[in-house]
Image (spheres, grey):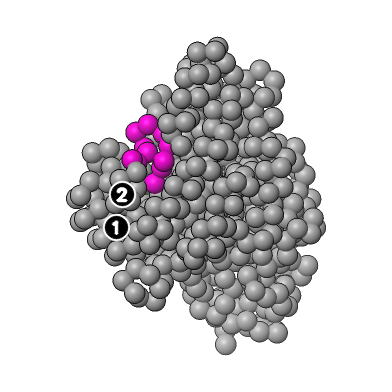
Amino acid sequence: MRFDTVIRNGTVVTASDTFKCDVGILDGRIAALAAELSNADEIIDAKGLYVMPGGIDSHVHLDQPSGEGIVMADDFDSGTRSAAIGGNSTVLTFCMQEKGQSLREALKIYHAKAAERCHVNVSFHLVITDPTPEVLGQELPALVADGYTSIKIFMTYDGLRLQDNEILATLDTARRTGALVMVHCENEEAIRYLIGRHEAEGRFEPKYHATTRPIAAEREATHRALSFAEIVDTPIVIVHVSNREAMEEIRRARGRGQKIAGETCPQYLMLTADDLDANAMDGAKYVCSPPPRDKESQDACWEGIEQNVFDLFSSDHCPFRFDDPEGKLNDKGKRSFRWIPNGIPGVATRLPILFSEGVMKGRIDINRFVALSSTNHAKLYGLYPRKGTISVGADADIALWDPNKVVTLTNSLLQHGADYTPFEGLEVRGWPVQLFLRGKSVVESCTFTSAEPAGQYIHRGRSSLLSQTAQGVA
Ligand code: DUC
Ligand code: ZN
Ligand code: ZN
């Protein structure tokens, strides 16, 4: 058999196995896995490297409206560039419904934003902010059938959050239509009350972002979301979990037999609320929601990664420039933490941090790394087995990792639109040295090798979490 490309002498890693073999690629797909393959137009020597499925980051915000006068630092060009630098071949981003807007209108806008400028594959979650009877009764079922098979809803933020009756109606519709729902769990009323109290007491600095969004507000909303999911018998994903108490809610719900996926992010392993208390306004760089907590919460999140409380490790990349009137230091943001846009950049640093802090420090094995970084995302969001694994027939979306390459994280390396990284100066061991999209090399040693953006938009199938529930279809 003749191949377009053969990757030779590498160590192939999947979520379940590690083995030495060559990978033969033909027409963008993996066509053979065998001891020795040689008949190819191009031979890549991967001696000493891990051959892994390209990362899938299922929680990435790009080019979203973020409030008056605020501009997100990444569009689909720069954001997907940065994703590729960090070893990702696919990102799942958000299509945000404005109030009064139909989901189809919103999709038209986001498809135009993404068209022909994606350097990795992209697929959209639908953010539902206005669950009218038309949206839930007519649009959503048709869109799920068209491959928009996941939804995000918010329990916080004025203008975004759903009321309890709307959450129930959305979850119920999701069950009937076969969509997976991601929930942002924080109690808006408690946060609003605390913000008012802080401002009345003259407390405006960035560090108060953390004290106005306490663990109890996240725990309560997590419990409520899980209870609603139980009441209407719908699997959900609890996204960006930051602490032990929210983890315990997930554990308990699973103990009751609920189908729940859990997600955590690098910021909850690597940052604490003390980072928000940095010199002058520097703390604004770390403002995200839920906020980073304390050392005990970091340890708890590592435990959740090691003990399978978490299925997903995502970046929640939500980038704003720091020193910019349209970013963190906008005029109002300088006056109160309330106006500092929430979110940090991280799509390029997610995998090097998990590899270095997780695999190289012995907390998780390399197969769990692949599960957390790629395979579970593919399964939960309807991309598997075409994406998220190394197997015959899968797309040749492949990352070659050098486990011995030591890199000091610095902003210029990451090619995103933000003017900082929260992880500046962190030394990581292990780096994605080459990335292939459908068999084509797109990045080598942090340099783009493909002249044209090679990413595609992907319509997705049903989540593995829903396979035995909605409509009884496997
Ligand atoms: N929630 C997210 O999922 N991302 C950024 C900000 C937020 O609140
Ligand atoms: Zn969120
Ligand atoms: Zn997010």
Q: Position of residue 196 (x, y in %)?
A: 47, 19
Q: Position of residue 13 (x, y in %)?
A: 67, 71
- Residue 471 part of the magenta-drawn span: no
- Residue at x 49%, y 66% (from the top left corner): 257
> Between 213 and 8, which is closer to the camera in this rendering?
213
Q: Is residue 308 left or right of residue 383?
A: right
**Which residue was labeled with disc 1?**
173
- Most common secondary structure along the magenta stretch: loop
Q: Earlier in the sequence, mark 1 or mark 2?
A: 2
**Which residue was labeled with disc 2?**
107
> Between 169 and 344, which is closer to the camera in this rendering?
169
Taking the image as drawn, is residue 428 in sight? yes
Label 1 Cα crowd, 10 Å radius (few <14 / some 14-19 / many 20+): some
Mark 2 vs ligand 3: CB below 8 Å? no
The amino acid beneath tag 1 is Thr
Q: CA distance from mark 1 to mark 2?
A: 19 Å
Which region shows up in magenta?
A: 153-163
Q: Position of residue 277 (x, y in %)?
A: 67, 24
> Between 364 and 391, which is closer to the camera in this rendering?
364
The residue tagged with tag 1: helix, strand or loop? helix
The amino acid beneath tag 2 is Leu
Mark 1 vs ligand 2: CB below 8 Å? no
Query: Considering only vertical position in the picture, is 309 above or below 466?
Result: above
